[in-house]
Amino acid sequence: MAADPGVSFVTRAPEKQPDLAAAPHTARPKVWIEGVMKSYSSKAVDNLLALRDVNLQVRPGEFISLLGPSGCGKTTLLKIIAGLVPFDSGRVDIDRDPVTEPSSKVAMVFQNFGLFPWRTVRGNVEFGLEAAGVPGKLRRETAEEYINLVGLGRFSNSHPSQLSGGMQQRVGLARALAVRPEILLMDEPFGALDAHTRELLQFEMLSILQKTQATIILVTHSVDEALVLSDRIAVFSPSPGHIMEVLDVDLPHPRDAAVKSLPRYAAMRQHIWDALRPVAKKDDAS
């Protein structure tokens, strides 16, 4: 289906932005990424460039997706924001502070759930609170609050092996949200789920996250997932990863499955595929 030629899109080229120090307080981004370069070395390859001149600003309370083909550096960028991976050059700031190590402002949700099999749901959700030294009573109350938020109140005493994949991912989300992060990073959180569960959980997740004030950055390969969840989408080129464009997703809220039937949704989906198709063909040919 071709996009309607009369439909316009609000996109921004990933150009370098004005100096952060000169930005007015109300306009300052939560996460500021400018000119980031990252390379890796291994026994097989020296100085493999993973990220090339990446520029992105993420607004407070925004949901932004990093979308692109496998191996384009999306997860590497997420780990750089989390302070887990160093970068070669450029700048990454959170609230104007340079990222040099993991921050208490940031929590991460992984694709593989990362749950402790010997702990109950409550025990898993309490883990980050324990590490932060939260007292026992408050820890339990907070864990129960977020277990209920993700709809698992009846399963507080269950172990991960007794839960479905979708339920396990909700536990991972509750654990991340329980520490009340200002920034939530999600690395393909639905990637291990079947298609039906994945779609259901996307809308459940959107409803849950709208009840928080967190700034959210999602890594995904799915155009539909990015459109359903995001306020904006940063579209990456193949490796070395570079942001080709940033697309405003001006679909109505609250979003449910019906949003996929909107002409605007179809047009935006086609626009993204048209942007990705040439670089995918070029990557396959190389």
Image (cartoon, rainbow, N blue to C red):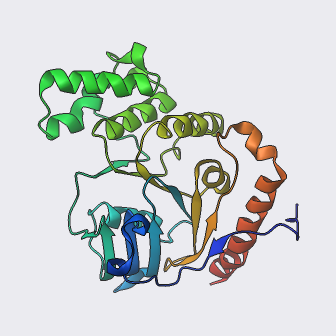
- The residue drawn where x is 33% and y is 67% is 80
Whether residue 223 sits left or right of residue 109 in the image: it is right
* Residue drawn at 52 percent across, 37 percent down: 205
Q: Quadrant of residue 193?
A: top right
Residue 119: quadrant of the picture? top left
View extreme (top): residue: 154
Q: Position of residue 55 (x, y in %)?
A: 46, 78
Q: Position of residue 32 (x, y in %)?
A: 38, 71
**Residue 144 image position (x, y, % from top left):** 32, 21
* Residue nearest the viewer, comparing 11 with 194: 11
The residue lying at 36 percent from left, 67 percent from top is: 25
User: Can you see residue 76?
Assistant: no
The residue closer to the viewer here, 16 or 257, is 16
Location of the C terminus by quadrant is bottom right
To which quarter of the image does residue 257 belong? top right
Q: Nearer the viewer, residue 157 or 234?
A: 234
